[in-house]
Image: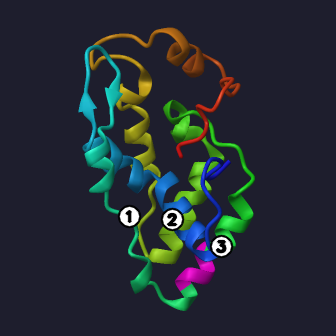
C-alpha cells in the first residue's frame, strides 16, 4: 500500500507526496544518495534523507493537484511488488503514468526497466548472481512475505 506507515496528512498532500516518493524518479534520486556497503546491499544515511528532493507542491496548478489526487485515490489500496520487480509492477507503472500525465513528463517505462537491473535492488553485485530472498523474488511471480512491497 502507498504510505502504509505514514502519519495521517492532508489528502491532497498525501496524494502528491506518496505518488512521488513511490515513483521511479524518486527511486532514482534515492539510489543516487545511497551509501554502498559490503556486498550487494546498500544503506541510506539519515542526513541523505533530509536532502532528498521531493515534488514542490507549491508550484503545481489546481489541475495537476486534482490529477494526482485522483490517481492517489485509484492507487492507494494497491499492493506494490518488491523493488526488484518494479519493471513488472502494474501499480508502479500506474503511478509513473499518473506523474507523467500530471507533470507533462515523458514515458517512464525505460527508466523503470533500467532501475530493475540496478544491482542494489537485485541483491547482487554488478557481476554476481542474485542470492537468498532476492533470487527467490526474481524467480517467483508471487509477492514476498513481509513489507518488501512498500517503499515507504
150 vs 33, left or right, is right
Gap between marks 1 and 2, in whole Å? Answer: 7 Å
The residue positioned 64% from the left and 42% from the top of the image is: 80
The residue positioned 58% from the left and 31% from the top of the image is: 148
Dot 1 surroundings within 10 Å: few (below 14), some, or many (20 or more)? Answer: few
Point out residue 55 in the picture as x, y percentages from the top left corner.
40, 69
Q: On the image, which quarter does residue 150 sit in?
A: top right
Dot 3 surroundings within 10 Å: few (below 14), some, or many (20 or more)? Answer: few
Q: Which residue is mark 3?
A: 11
Gap between marks 3 and 1, in whole Å? Answer: 17 Å
Q: Which residues are magenta?
A: 64-68
Q: Which residue is mark 1?
A: 54
What secondary structure predominates along the stretch shown in magenta?
A: helix
Point out residue 53 in the picture as x, y percentages from the top left corner.
32, 61
Asked if the magenta segment contains residue 123, the reply would be no
36 vs 40, left or right, is left
Pick whichever, 151 or 49, lies toward us. 49
Point out residue 149 in the picture as x, y percentages from the top left corner.
61, 36
Against 48, residue 68 (above or below) is below
Against 8, residue 142 (above or below) is above
Q: Which residue is mark 2?
A: 17
Q: How many marks?
A: 3
The reply to whether the C-beta atoms of the residues labelled 1 and 2 are less than 8 Å apart is yes
The local secondary structure at tag 3 comes to helix
Amino acid at each position: 500500500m502507498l504510505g502504509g506507515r505514514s502519519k495521517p496528512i492532508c489528502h491532497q498532500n498525501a496524494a502528491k507526496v506518496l505518488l512521488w516518493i513511490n515513483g521511479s524518479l524518486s527511486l532514482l534520486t534515492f539510489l543516487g544518495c545511497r551509501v554502498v556497503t559490503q556486498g550487494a546491499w546498500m544503506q541510506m544515511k539519515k542526513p541523505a534523507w533530509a536532502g532528498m528532493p521531493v515534488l514542490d507542491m507549491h508550484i503545481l496548478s489546481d489541475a495537476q493537484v486534482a490529477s494526482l489526487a485522483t490517481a492517489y485515490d485509484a492507487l492507494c489500496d494497491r499492493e506494490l511488488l518488491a523493488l526488484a520487480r518494479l519493471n513488472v509492477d502494474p501499480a508502479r507503472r500506474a503511478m509513473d503514468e499518473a506523474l507523467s500525465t500530471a507533470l507533462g513528463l515523458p514515458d517512464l517505462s525505460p527508466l523503470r526497466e533500467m532501475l530493475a537491473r540496478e544491482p542494489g535492488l537485485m541483491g547482487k553485485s554488478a557481476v554476481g548472481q542474485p542470492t537468498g530472498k532476492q533470487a527467490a523474488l526474481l524467480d517467483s511471480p508471487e509477492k514476498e512475505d513481509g513489507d518488501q512491497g512498500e517503499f515507504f
